Amino acid sequence: MSETKKQQWKELSDKEKSLRIENARQGLINYHKNVSQDKKEAKAKKTKETWDNMCEEKKKSIKEKQSIIAKNRKKKKCVYCGIEVDPGNFARHHGEKCKKRV
């Protein structure tokens, strides 16, 4: 991103930033709704072929980076059971959905 764009982003209010981010997400959602199943399957096949043709060292490097990112992800603590989990698992199993919630 250019310095000008970075500066423009910093000058935006939090409300404007949130609105732009949400609009971008909606655009992606609408894009994926309109993509044909054939295109999705072709993309998945190409991705699998790329991964299969990659050398083992490169695969190991990618997996290590992903592991580090996952381990450094911020954790959320459930107020009902006290477990600290990543945001995805928190949203799915904890908070208002926690089994130990009375």
Image: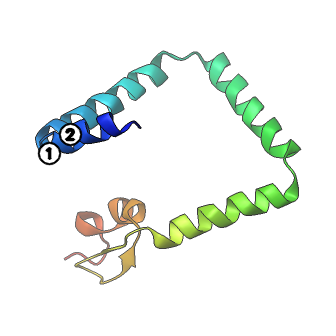
* Residue 99 horizontal/vertical position (percent): 32, 73
Residue at screen point 39% across, 21% down: 30
* Residue 95 horizontal/vertical position (percent): 25, 68
Identity of the residue furthest to the bottom in this view: 82
Q: Say which residue label 2 marks.
A: 17
The kind of residue tagged 2 is Lys
Crowdedness near tag 2: few (<14), some (14–19) or many (≥20) residues, C-alpha within 10 Å: some
Mark linked to residue 54: none
* Residue 58 horizontal/vertical position (percent): 79, 56
The kind of residue tagged 1 is Asp
Residue at screen point 54% across, 17% down: 35
Above or below, comparing residue 29 to residue 34 in the picture = below
Q: Quadrant of the N terminus?
A: top left
Q: Quadrant of residue 28?
A: top left
Q: Quadrant of the C terminus?
A: bottom left
Q: Say which residue label 1 marks.
A: 14
